[in-house]
Amino acid sequence: MALSAARVGTVVPLLDPNRVIGIDPGLTVTGYAVLERRGSSSAAMIEAGVIRPRGDDLARKLAWLHKAVADVIKSFPASAVALEQVHSRVAFPRTALLMAHARGVIVLAAAERGVPVHDYAPSRIKKTLTGNGRASKEQMQHAVMTELGLGRLPEPHDVADACALAICHLAIARIARGLAGA
């Protein structure tokens, strides 16, 4: 791992410009995926999995989630974290509040390592991968499997969602680079 001195006495890993971490936040299950851009348009999965925060109360779950996400970010230096925006249904406002807590500790973990966070709406992610902003979970799993050349559907759906976030970010960054070069 390449290192650079940020300040006297502090050594931080260089961020890999071809790597992105997608995170699907949750207090029960948080999916994550580390993808790396290969060539001009393809991506490869480096690591993916789920974090299941432990603890009896909100504070302990958040502390567990923060440490686990920080460990992923430290282990796989990336140029960005792609994170799903908070969304809620009117009937379930508590879900949005709990997701916001999870997002907060994830953003903190990224900030501590100097990794920028990019937020994406679920409909934007779905449209980028399938062309349909209202795609089902199954359609998204198939799109991720195809895009990454996987031999089977990514499971559980939290991992597929994290992969989709990372793929979406890589696609949008590729378009932005193309526009900047034009």
Image (cartoon, rainbow, N blue to C red):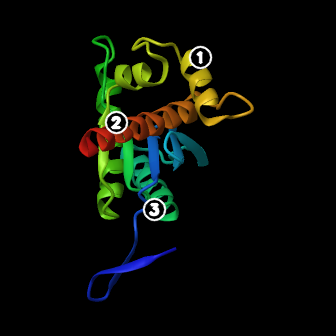
Q: Where is residue 3 in the image (x, y as percent from the top left)?
A: 43, 78
Pointer 1: what residue? 138
Q: Nearer the viewer, residue 31 or 115?
A: 115
Amino acid type assigned to the residue bearing label 3 in the image: Pro
Amino acid type assigned to the residue bearing label 2 in the image: Ile
Q: Residue furthest front?
A: 182
Tag shown at residue 78: none
Residue 26 in view (yes/no) = no
Q: Which of marks 1 and 3 is nearer the N terminus?
A: 3
Pointer 3: what residue? 77
Tags 2 and 1 in contact by the CB under 8 Å rule? Answer: no
Where is 163 relative to 62, above or below?
A: above
Where is 11 relative to 162, above or below?
A: below
Amino acid type assigned to the residue bearing label 1 in the image: Glu
Where is 15 relative to 57, above or below?
A: below
How packed is label 1: few (under 14 Cα within 10 Å), some, or many (20 or more)?
few
Q: Nearer the viewer, mark 3 or mark 2?
A: 2
Point out the image quarter for the C terminus: top left
Q: Nearer the viewer, mark 2 or mark 1?
A: 2
How packed is label 2: few (under 14 Cα within 10 Å), some, or many (20 or more)?
few
Pointer 2: what residue? 175
